[in-house]
Amino acid sequence: MRNKTILILCIALLTGCEKITDINQQILFQVEYMNAAWGPQHHVRLVDSSGIVTSYDLPVIWNHPNSNGYISLFKMNENIVQTGEIDCTINKNILKKYFNKLDEAEKGDISDPEHRMYDAGITIYSGFLYDSHKEMYKQVFIRQVGDMYIENESNDANDIYNWMITICDKK
């Protein structure tokens, strides 16, 4: 346990060095896909404050935000440790543009769930705002697609979603 804690702290310190100076948190966005229809599938892509996008498949441990949408700094760092190699990097000006939309997106109304597919699983698009007093990240729900569709109806959330679906697009 001690070695794991030291590893988490080292990663947090090392990856935080190149962050955008006025964004005071490590993780900004997340895309998470889950499906159990054809065997367990769990894939997550994290975007950090330096524009680095990393991902993982089938983590051993994964910490989700609580029912109020919060995840502790420690648990987020446990998630970060599980990511693998870099998928791509995002221009810091573009990253900052979409991060700055999260405050307004957080105020958006959330639609009622709508059943749209079968056995497609779900993909959840989220942003995070860090509360340094609580040492917790607050999840900002953007959109869920797949079997159940749920949408944050704010214009800023829609802008973020349209950008997030292009992250690491190889086209």
Image (cartoon, rainbow, N blue to C red):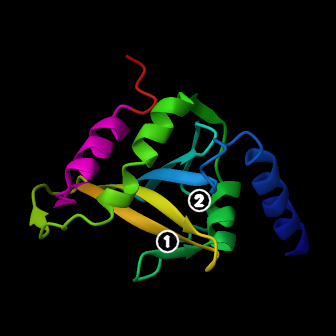
Q: Is residue 153 visible?
A: yes
**Which residue is found at the position 45% from the left and 56% from the top?**
42
Quarter holding the N terminus?
Answer: bottom right
* C-beta proximity under 8 Å, tags 1 and 2: no
* Start-end of magenta stretch: 145-166
User: Circle 1 is placed at which residue position?
Assistant: 64
x, y percentage for residue 7? 84, 60
**Which residue is found at the position 12% from the left and 70% from the top?**
112
Q: CA distance from mark 1 to mark 2?
A: 12 Å
Q: Which mark is residue 125?
A: none
Q: Using the image as rendered, state which of residue 154 and residue 76 is in the foreground.
A: 154
Q: Assess whether residue 153 is covered by the magenta stretch.
A: yes
Assess disc 1: are there few (<14), some (14-19) or many (≥20) residues with their C-alpha within 10 Å of its C-alpha: some
Query: Which quadrant would residue 21 be assigned to in this image?
Result: top right
Q: Is residue 137 above or below residue 159?
A: below
Left or right: where 162 falls relative to 67: left
User: Count of labels shown?
Assistant: 2
